[in-house]
Amino acid sequence: ESSYEGDCPICFLPISFDKTKSTLMSCCSKIICKGCVHSYDIRIFQESLEPTCPFCRQPASESEEEVVKNIMKRANANDPVAMLQMGLRRCWSGDHDDAFRYANKAAELG
């Protein structure tokens, strides 16, 4: 049975309610279970590959600025997960009006 977070797009197991057991990928806004991330990291290490997203294969972000840029790019494409992430980031920075706008738009988009 799926959680409200849905299923991991790689293994299709339900995403845990425990946020420490999943990772939000900023490049594609997919929530991936830690098991799939761990398996992919092992493959990257064993085969000496460049780190990429286990879902979309985009190169891994190397800085927080890159993460924010990726989230903003997804938000501009009307991705509700990215909109919510931008809203949370705005809330944490104290910009509650902008946070509300992002969260409201995320809710409208589903």
Image (cartoon, rainbow, N blue to C red):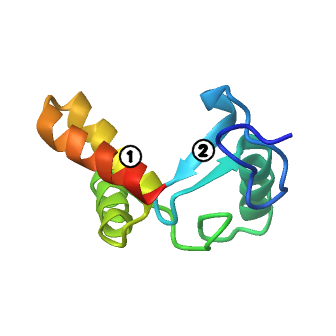
Disc 1 to disc 2: CB gap under 8 Å: no
* Residue 50 locus on image (x, y percent): 60, 70
* Residue 66 locus on image (x, y percent): 33, 60
Number of marks in the rendered image = 2
Give the amino acid type for the residue marked by disc 1 in the picture. Answer: Leu
Q: Nearer the viewer, mark 1 or mark 2?
A: 1
The residue that label 1 is drawn on is: 84
Quarter in which the N terminus is drawn: top right
* Residue 47 locus on image (x, y percent): 78, 69
Q: Report whether 63 appears left or right of 79.
A: left
User: In the structure shown, which secondary structural element does the residue marked by tag 2 occupy?
Assistant: strand
The foreground one among 58 and 75 is 75
Per the model, the C-alpha gap separating discs 1 and 2 is: 15 Å
Q: Residue at x 23, y 39 (%)?
A: 100
Q: Residue at x 73, y 41 (%)?
A: 15
Q: Earlier in the sequence, mark 1 or mark 2?
A: 2
Give the amino acid type for the residue marked by disc 2 in the picture. Answer: Thr
User: In the structure shown, which secondary structural element does the residue marked by tag 1 occupy?
Assistant: helix
**In the picture, residue 93 is in which quadrant?**
top left
Against 104, is 57 above or below? below
The foreground one among 61 and 15 is 15
The residue that label 2 is drawn on is: 23
Q: Residue at x 84, y 56 (%)?
A: 11
The foreground one among 8 and 97 is 97
Q: Residue at x 61, y 73 (%)?
A: 57
* Residue 78 locus on image (x, y percent): 37, 67
The foreground one among 4 and 12 is 4
Against 58, is 7 above or below? above
- Crowd band around label 1 with a 10 angstrom C-alpha radius: few (<14), some (14–19), many (20+): many
Mark seen at residue 52: none
Kindly give the residue lying farthest to the front in the view shown. Answer: 108
Q: Report whether 25 appears left or right of 13.
A: left
